[in-house]
Image (cartoon, rainbow, N blue to C red):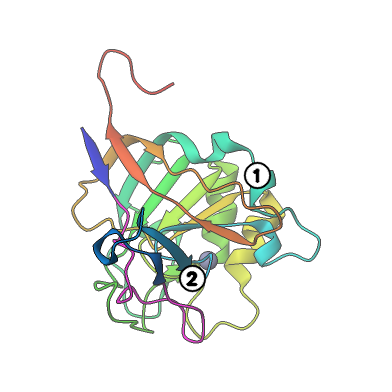
Amino acid sequence: MLHDITPTIDESLKVWPGDTPARREVMLDLARGDAVTLSTLHATAHLGAHADAPSHYGLDAPSIEARPLDLYVGLCQVITVPAAPRSRIRLDDLRATVQAPRVLIKTGSYPDFRTFAQDFAALCPTLVDNLSAQGVRLIGIDTPSVDVFDSVDLPAHRRFLAHDMAILEGLELSAVPDGLYELIALPLKLAGFDASPVRAVLRTLDEKRGPA
Ligand SMILES: [Zn+2]
């Protein structure tokens, strides 16, 4: 079974204030008598469920096409962490043993992808350090950022850079029970880009075979 953890992309999907929302420009249209329907997507690369590249927060750091694909495919653990508005989640808040190299944190603090609420919870920089020490290579979150909204120095993002870990933001985790899955969330091969939208899914583990 596949859980789709990707919010639908349309013009009502909120992006970071000041960033470019999705817009579909129809260039050709079968309904108007054209030979095909053909449309252009205008949008930020940080659109809905997306992978941040290190170049988003590190000067001269790798852009998204250069990232190893195995970061984004494989065994993954969903952990619910009820978090106060604008708080930063710490290791003590997890109340679950980390059992996978990819961890998705379900804060429930950004409940509506059609309304940009600025009071979402985020990650404590020390949590990124702690999970890195436990072998975690990717952390995903159900909010627009791993840092709180008004953060200027982005301390959590900086720890991802220090450990060469991967970030997924904007995941729709509300319908997914905690537990182990196979994550598939590949970024597009966008040369020079600081992020890419992903179609993120969680596959239920086959108890006999498990994920690769
Ligand atoms: Zn981002």
In the depicted view, which residue is nearer to us: 127 or 6?
A: 6
Q: Residues within 10 Å of mark 1 (few under 14, many from 20)?
A: some
Quadrant containing the N terminus in the rendered view? top left
Q: Residue type at mark 1: give it.
A: Arg
Magenta range is: 5-22
Residue 138 x, y percent position in the rendering = 52, 47
Q: Is mark 1 within 8 Å of ligand 1?
A: no
Q: Name the residue under label 1.
A: 67
The vertical placement of 206 against 105, above or below, is above
In this orientation, does residue 155 appear? yes
The vertical placement of 204 against 148, above or below, is above
What is the secondary structure assignment of the residue under circle 1? loop
What is the secondary structure assignment of the residue under circle 2? strand
The vertical placement of 72 against 118, above or below, is above
Q: Residue type at mark 2: give it.
A: His
Residue pictured at 24% horizontal, 63% vertical? 31
* Number of numbered discs visible in the structure rendering: 2
- In terms of secondary structure, what is the magenta stretch mainly? loop
Q: Which circle marks residue 42 in the picture? A: 2
In this orientation, does residue 96 appear? no
In the depicted view, which residue is nearer to us: 144 or 207?
A: 144
- Indicate the quadrant where residue 134 lies: top right
Residue 10 forms part of the magenta stretch: yes
